[in-house]
Image: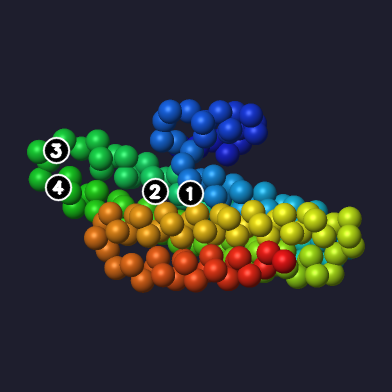
């Protein structure tokens, strides 16, 4: 499980390590949390308490999704470690993969919300803060795109309905519209 209380250096070392601990879903969620934090800073500098509060709530939800994604992936690893001759292995793996699609599906939606808020903040920001808001939008849009890909991969591997992947793709497309 990923330690979200680690230093940035330790987290980046964990991401780069040859172990499946901090995977794409966790990194996407942490990236979304960073984007929301950047927005909170921009809003606070504008003395926009409402948007700062919204950004903080989004940041907290992204951190929660990082933990949820890590937990869900641990379930996939546990199912994969079951003996090949275990009669319940295939069903457990299918269930774990379908479950692993949940956190990134929620992340795609959340990242789209962050990107939309970033667009609002950028539209009203002074030039000195506009770049930060646009950076937040770009980070969130990238995280949404990655999350949508993870949803599709997990659901396809589980042989599950791909409708949630289509919805995640729509959220990623919506997030990308806030990049200018």
Name the spot of residue 123 as percent of width and height, x first: 80, 70
The residue mark sitting in front, 1 or 2, is 1
Q: Distance between the residues labelled 4 and 3?
A: 9 Å
Cβ–Cβ under 8 Å for marks 2 and 3: no
Front position among marks 2 and 3:
3
Do the numbered discs 4 and 3 sit on residues whose CB atoms are within 8 Å? Answer: no
Badge 1 density bin: few <14, some 14–19, many ≥20, Cα 10 Å: many
Q: Mark 2 points at which residue?
A: 72
Residue position for label 3: 84
Assess whether mark 2 and mark 1 are in contact (beta carbons under 8 angstroms). Answer: yes
Q: Dot 2: within a 10 Å radius of its alpha carbon, few (fewer than 14), some, or many (20 or more) residues?
A: many
Residue occupying image coordinates x 32% and y 45% = 76
Residue in the image at 42% along x and 45% along y? 71
- Indicate which disc residue 88 carries: 4
In the rendered structure, find residue 25 and report the number of the disc placed on it. Answer: 1
Task: Classify mark 1: helix, strand or loop.
Answer: helix
Q: How many neighbours does mark 4 have within 10 angstroms: few (below 14), some (14-19), or many (20 or more)?
A: few
- Look at the numbered disc 4 and give the secondary structure of its residue: loop
Per the model, the C-alpha gap separating discs 1 and 3 is 27 Å
SS for tag 2? helix
**Which label sits in the foreground, 4 or 3?**
3
């Amino acid at each position: 499980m990923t330690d979200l209380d680690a230093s940035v250096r330790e987290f980046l070392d964990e991401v780069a390590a040859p172990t499946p601990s901090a995977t794409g879903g966790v990194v996407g969620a942490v990236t979304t949390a960073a984007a929301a934090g950047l927005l909170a800073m921009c809003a606070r500098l504008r003395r926009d308490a409402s948007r700062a509060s919204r950004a903080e709530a989004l940041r907290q939800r992204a951190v929660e999704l990082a933990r949820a994604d890590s937990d869900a992936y641990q379930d996939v690893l546990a199912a994969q470690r079951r003996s090949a001759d275990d009669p319940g292995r295939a069903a457990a793996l299918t269930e774990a993969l379908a479950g692993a699609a949940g956190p990134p599906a929620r992340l795609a939606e959340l990242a789209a919300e962050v990107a939309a808020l970033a667009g609002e903040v950028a539209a009203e920001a002074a030039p000195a803060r506009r770049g930060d808001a646009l950076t937040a939008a770009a980070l969130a849009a990238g995280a949404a795109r990655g999350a949508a890909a993870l949803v599709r991969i997990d659901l396809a591997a589980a042989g599950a309905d791909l409708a949630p992947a289509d919805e995640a793709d729509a959220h990623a497309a919506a997030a990308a519209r806030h990049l200018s």
